Amino acid sequence: MTFLVSLDTLTLPEAPEISATTNIDSVVERLTAVVGIGLNLHEPPEGQTRRPVSAKLRHALAFVFQKQEEVSHPKFLFHEQSDNWVAQTIKDTLPYFLGAVDDDFVAKKAKLRELRRQLPPMPQ
């Protein structure tokens, strides 16, 4: 099946007729799914002030791209790792990208929370 559009028959809409049908977050979510990153969530240990993080396509980029000065830097292995926030996010998402966290980890964790709620209170 071949699709061919001739430019003499194609009519483009005028600028006022064009409207956004999506946003950057939707595009990132779609691309994340397309590259095979499943549902996942890293929840920091109790007492930590940082929020839970879900590994997305944006996080994978730290493992793919590097600036020239990052390649030759003896203290940093990943892109923008010198930023403390980025370094912590790398630590939180790396287990998922290495395959140490299954795609069904989030579902299992939700089931565990539900089962814990169903337990009778512990006597003191």
Image: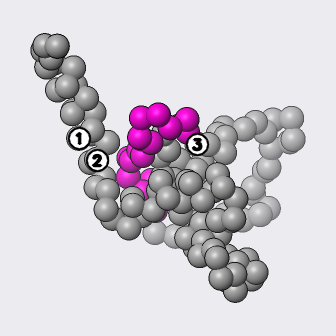
Query: Secondary structure under badge 1?
Result: helix
Residue at image point 19% right, 25% down: 116
Q: Would residue 40 appear left or right of 76 to someone viewing this image?
A: left
As rendered, which of 52 and 25 lies closer to the eye?
52
CB under 8 Å between discs 1 and 2: yes
Question: How far, Cα to Cα, is label 1 from label 3?
Answer: 26 Å
Give the magenta range: 31-51
Figure check: 87 above or below 70: above
Mark 1 or 3 closer to N-term? 3
* Residue position marked by numbered label 2 in the rendering: 105
Q: Is residue 30 visible?
A: no
Task: Say the numbered circle drawn on residue 108.
Answer: 1
- Residue 26: where, in percent of width, then height? 58, 42
* Rendered-image quadrant of the C terminus: top left
Mark 2 or 3 closer to N-term? 3
Of tags 2 and 3, the one toward the viewer is: 2
Picture quarter containing residue 43?
Answer: top left
- Residue 51: where, in percent of width, then height? 53, 37
